[in-house]
Image (cartoon, grey):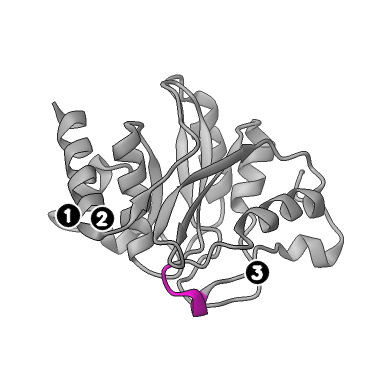
Amino acid sequence: MWRKIRRSCARVLIRVSRWDHVSTERVAPGESRILIGAPHTSNWDFIMMLGIAWDLDFPVRWLGKDSLFRGVMGPVMRAIGGIPVDRRRPFGLVEDLVEQAKVTGDGFTLVVTPEGTRGAGKYWKSGFYRIAMATGIPVTLGYVDRTTRTFGLGMTFTPTGDVRADMDTIRAFYEDKAGYHPQNRTEPRLREEDKGTSTAN
């Protein structure tokens, strides 16, 4: 019943939004994915990513600041897949998520917004890459593009450990994706690329 309700809600949202959901990828039951949500330029990005998951009928987990989980909203946020994060104590978060991914037997799809902020920046955060490398879970590229008023899931690939080559793949995909507020878009790039180091370990 709950699955039917959330799928109906997603389709109503898409219909009234005047945007088109055009996913070319699917997440099969029991599959695990690291799902990138980018460009992350607005709070609408989260709603659209949730709409994608509900419309395609697969469960997702997502990270949110711990203040969102206080009071009466806490159970609601957890029910739709939220994982509270204390930004004052972020250490160990990636390791905890890696362990969750390894022990989950019915699929683990985690939505990550690696830009880390809705404003323009210089680098993406590398947590998604570290989790993918530690678990072998493929990365699916989700997007929001205001120029075409489309959003959805695009290509899926498995990181190789060659950070620059993998990020070139990601950059090529997002090259023509503008986000909800194009001026706030951050070019996909990890600090490790400029340092010449690997996030594989």
Depth check: 172 or 147 in front? 147
User: How far separated are the C-alphas under marks 3 and 1?
Assistant: 32 Å
Marks 2/1 in contact by CB < 8 Å: the verdict is yes
Label 3: element kind:
loop
Q: Is residue 74 visible?
A: no
Q: Position of residue 127 (x, y in %)?
A: 60, 52
Image point (34%, 66%), residue name: 43
* Residue topped by disc 3: 123
Would you say 193 lies left or right of 118 here? right
- Disc 1 is placed on an element classified as helix
Q: Where is residue 154 in the image (x, y as percent from the top left)?
A: 54, 44
Seen from the viewer's position, the closer of residues 1 and 80 is 1
Q: Circle 2 sits on which residue? A: 69
Residue at 47%, 64% (x, y): give it.
Answer: 40
Q: Determine the residue positioned at 38% across, 60% down.
A: 45
Residue 104 drawn in magenta: no
Mark 1 = which residue?
A: 73
User: Which label's residue is closer to the chain start, 3 or 1?
Assistant: 1
Span shown in magenta: 180-184
Q: Which amino acid does label 3 sit on?
A: Tyr
Position in image of residue 149 (x %, y %): 39, 61
